[in-house]
Amino acid sequence: MSAVGEGLLFLASRGEYTLVSRAISLTLAVSADFRSIWKVPEIMQSLPIIGDAETHLTQAASGPPVEGFCKGTYAFVTLGCPKNLVDSEKMLGILALDGYALVSEPTGADFVIVNTCGFIESSRAESKAVIREMLDLKKAGKTKGVIVAGCLPQRLGPALQDELPEIDHIVGVFGRDEINRVADHLIGGSREQRQLFRPAPVKALDDRARLRLTPEHFAYLKISEGCDRTCTFCSIPKMRGKHITKPIEMVISEAQELAKDGVRELNIVAQDTTYYGLDFYGEVRLVQLLKELEKVDGIDWIRLMYLYPVNFTDELIDTIAGSDKIIPYLDMPLQHINDTVLKRMQRRVNRRQTVDLVQKLRARIDNLVMRTTFVVGFPGESDAQFQELKQFVAESKFERMGVFSYSLEPDTPAVKLDGHLPEEVKIARRDELMALQQPLAFAYGDSLVGNEIDVLIDDVVEDGLWRGRGYMDAPEIDGEVIVSGVDLRPGMFVPVEILERRDYDLVGVMVNDEVAPEWLATRDDGIWWHVKYWTLAQPAECDHVLPIRLVLCAVCPDGHAWPLALGSVAVRAGGAYGCAGWLDC
């Protein structure tokens, strides 16, 4: 299920958090009977941005309970990665089905749920800050209770409630499907059973029938939970448990549900995507899953994320390379390249294997875009080993890349390693590696200028101007394409000619068979402009003059392209040009 219509979602990005806000209607992609119990709610007031949160316009989820019945109202804050977002969406779906109404303001709500992240120290600090903010509302009498769910309580256990005793209930990762029961306890005033922790499941949790927070046209599809890797720096297995594969039939059923709900882009997520199937089927079955996903009607893009550089078989590469739906975008965290560092990280892959895999992928998958991440400042990392990493990045020319400075995580094996580095050294190395990457990313963007690419429209910026993404950009973490065009809407795929790069983003114009390129026009001062694109509007009263809406863009005498809607132009059939509403160059 998803929210449809306008809405605001404040997203967790670079230390910010997501606060679910408004929507105007709700659709459920489960069954006609399920859908019939809902009606369109009134438009809710949008929630103001809290703190310094950067906002991204998208669609959010909200909906009424069963008509005539409401157990209570609640607000929802979600933090962390896309996998946690799926958990949030599942909890929202469960609460909606049980008669709880999601509202846009925590002030006045019966309770607030915070689904937290506990991956590294900075994310734990962020989660606690948000929790305290909600507890302040409770102390002020503006909400009656606070429920904290997700990775932070899973990691800290009862100690979280010892630290913040004002929290009414805490729910571990694997208690998410009982969130309605926890809400019942809170609404009923019970002060017992304030902590809900369940053991890691032996079978995959079902993520179907969730209330999506993403826009209608894209979604995250979680194909497994947990991780069997033993990376010494990582706490995920302690929070998410062992790897549990979601059976192919369940994944396909969920994909079909999403497609019926309007999804055109599936972003495949897991803790370790290339491990898929090994625990359940006794062998890796990612290829088989992908071939079944390709058959789902309505899905145009399948994006693979969180790939581990192991189990990357020739069959998998050929499947990606030969697919019309699996886009040539691979998110594959490599973490480092030096053999000694990789061994201390316990990554179970070495430099030669990594280099060979990257080269093989580049050679066999046309137009491949690779996203990766690295950890710098790992215990014992010498300057020479860091320089080796820099050289590898310079040679590999990853189109997309992120860098983390090592975070010392309690109860992980890396804590006991020798050679821990000062924080300022770790930060300096992170900044140095990102500075090396930036011109490489910009060069890739420049290489797209002049080319035509398919862009998936995400939302509107202003009249005639839209925000979208090419296949090379994953939602929220990569760049975007600013598109000038008419009659567009979110979820449309449109051909776009790229006109220029602006930092990590691109600017382009919709290509239309009815758009005529390469015209010349003149301003009143006699300066000629090279008008690249225009579209026909309704014919004017005069038989010999056609009004033209200049979509994008004009090129002024110094060669600079202005990717803006510049006004309207009158083009006389005899070849004489006049114009109105020009912007100065």
Image (cartoon, grey):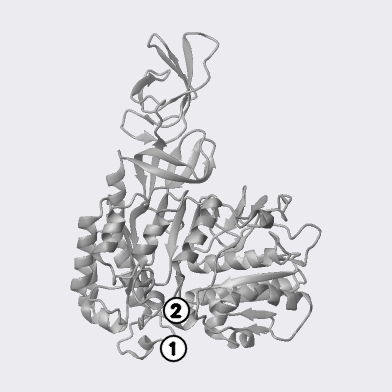
Instruction: Give me the disc on residue 132.
Output: none
Which amino acid type is marked by label 2?
A: Ile
**Left or right of 326 in this view: 217:** right
The residue tagged with tag 2: helix, strand or loop?
helix
The residue tagged with tag 1: helix, strand or loop?
loop
Question: Which quadrant holds residue 357?
Answer: bottom left
**Left or right of 421 in this view: 157:** right
Q: On screen, 456 above or below 512?
A: below
Q: Position of residue 578 (x, y in %)?
A: 44, 16
Mark positioned earlier in the residue sequence (2 or 1): 2
Can see residue 439? Answer: no
Task: Identify the residue shown where x is 53% and y is 14%.
Answer: 540
Residue farthest along the right direction in this orientation: 68
Q: Position of residue 286 (x, y in %)?
A: 36, 66
**Left or right of 194 in this view: 360:** left
Instruction: Give me the disc on residue 411.
Output: 1
Question: Which quadrant holds residue 147?
Answer: bottom right
Q: Position of residue 289 (x, y in %)?
A: 39, 63
- Residue under label 2: 236
Q: On screen, 51 above or below 201?
A: above
Q: Give the label, 2 or 1, closer to the camera.
A: 2
CA gap, disc 2 to disc 1? 11 Å
